[in-house]
Amino acid sequence: MNYENTLALCRDFPSLYVKEATKEECERRSQCEFLSEASRKVMGLSVNGEPLMLAMQWGFECGDGWFDLIHRLSVDIAEHAQTYGLHPYASQVKEKFGSLRFHMQFREKVATVIQECGIDPQTGRWANGEVEYLPGVKEIRALLRHAEEASASICEGCGAPGSLITDGWHHVHCAQCEAEYRRKRGVT
């Protein structure tokens, strides 16, 4: 994702995408050869003299066509987080197998193990574990699944309606973006 869109998401949803960092952390991360140019530029910003960096190691690893989808998802996550008093942040936002993957963590403990996985001593059979989540966690995860499903029909390049194309690399493009993609790769 380009710098302008990255900056817009960080500006509009700092609790989801930006974390405070020491100057040493920013310097160390900026040396990473795989860091996107947009991530490098965001690390040059500061608030009250304190440096900021993306909460995600690699920045937004997807095309600009998904900006609106990610922005809408961010609005929904922020509203749910405020309603339920949760503090989520994105640990990775990327394209994988042609659709959006939005990995999220929470700043608080959101799950309690009620029962561990393993052999039930009473029956001698395998028992699946049981986990209880804080209110709102399942709802936020449902938002993520919905956005991931929606991305499978949105062109990653421009945001127009698109189709999943599996020609060795899974991606979603409209006809125009696919033609440009093939032209750049020298594929007819």
Image: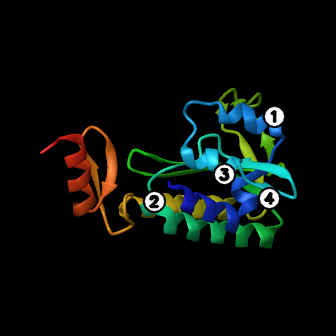
Residue with the mark numbered 3: 42
Question: On the image, which quarter does residue 34 sit in?
Answer: top right
* Residue 107 visible in rendering: no
Q: How is the image coloured?
A: rainbow
Q: How many angstroms separate mark 3 from mark 4 (CA)?
A: 22 Å
Residue at 78% in and 36% down:
25
Point out the tag, 2 or 3, that comes first from the N-terminus.
3
How far apart, in angstroms, are the residues tagged by discs 4 and 1?
Answer: 25 Å
Q: Earlier in the sequence, mark 4 or mark 1?
A: 1
The residue at 63%/49% (across/down) is 41
Image position, residue 74 (x, y; %): 63, 66
Instruction: Report how far apart the C-alphas of labels 2 and 3 lie in the structure.
Output: 17 Å
Separation of marks 1 and 3 at Cα, in angstroms:
15 Å
Q: Amino acid at mark 2?
A: Asp
In which quadrant will I find the C terminus? top left
Q: Report the mark closest to the observer, 3 or 4.
A: 3
Q: Nearer the viewer, residue 32 or 145?
A: 32
Query: Looking at the image, is mark 2 or mark 4 nearer the viewer?
Result: 2
Query: Tag 3: Cα neighbours inside 10 Å, few (<14), some, or many (≥20)?
Result: many
Q: Which mark is residue 87?
A: 4
Q: Is residue 26 left or right of residue 9?
A: right
Q: Is residue 65 above or below residue 170?
A: below
Badge 4 marks a residue whose secondary structure is loop
